[in-house]
Image (cartoon, rainbow, N blue to C red):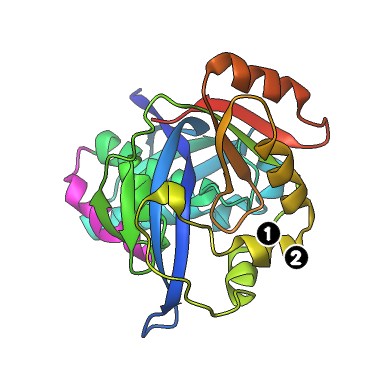
Amino acid sequence: MTEYCEPAPAKLNLALHVRGKLPDGRHRIETIFAFCTDGDELSAADADNLSLDVRGPFAGDLGNPADNLALRAANALREHAGTDRGARLTLTKSLPVASGIGGGSADAAAALRLLTRLWSIDPAHASAVAPGLGADVPACLLSMSVRGDGAGDELVPVDAGVSGTPVLLVNPRVELKTADVFAAWNGEDKGPLGDWRAGRNDLEVAAIEQVPLVGTVLAWLSVQNGVSFARMSGSGATCFALFESEDARDHAEIAVPREWWRLATYLR
């Protein structure tokens, strides 16, 4: 029986500028996406029908597997490609839910890549259905450093200069819904995105207002030895810090308060 595995790397927004609204009501953003070497994992095996089994430390937070974005991606791909193939999907959920690091979008993108291989279909089908699954899914499908404009789905490859950088992700184990954070954005356009290191995450203030612990995590990361950069990712609540060395990152990981989730990894 043919079986494949595919990583669903955690997504980071190195900067995220909110510039206004698009005609369809979505927010117009400018962002730099980067991806970690670790995240969730998806596997697929031949089967008569499409199904999804979820396991891992955050499996219980996802609700009904039938509503999972990875399964929706599989159904969308099958319909677009005009195939009647099935698959038994298994998702190992290691990333916290609603945490600003693209977990659901990364899972959906992994399903598209995985089933493109399993079903031997043109990857163009995956690219075609990705935007309809969520604004972050096209970037997650590529899983490489890109600039995102529009709703974040108009992509241009960039060299962010971070490949191989040790990074520590920390989440206070509080869910933040993307729609709620965007709705709380104050509407002020603070200008375009240039160098991401000199940029901003315009959603930080709104996220901290809703979950003050986000500010606590960000402040904690910022003062760790060897940190060269710290910021909140996406709509939160996960924050990240880039480190000058693997040793410095590992020492910080050990010191992360027990009640917070953490992931020590690298940027791709």
Crowding around mark 2 (Cα neighbors within 10 Å: few <14, some 14 to 19, many 20+) is some
Residue at 64%, 49% in the rendered image: 97
In the rendered image, which quarter contains the C terminus? top left
- Left or right: where 59 falls relative to 6: right
Q: Is residue 57 visible?
A: no
Q: Position of residue 40 (x, y in %)?
A: 53, 35
Residue sticking out furthest to the bottom: 23
Asked if residue 157 lies in the magenta stretch, the reply is no
Residue range corresponding to the magenta coloring: 120-132
Residue hosting label 1? 176
Residue sticking out furthest to the top: 247
Front residue of 251/7: it is 251
Asked if residue 121 lies in the magenta stretch, the reply is yes
Q: Is residue 44 visible?
A: yes
Give the alpha-carbon distance from disc 1 to disc 2, as whole Å: 8 Å
Mark 1 residue type? Leu
Q: Position of residue 114 (x, y in %)?
A: 34, 37
Front residue of 10/116: it is 10
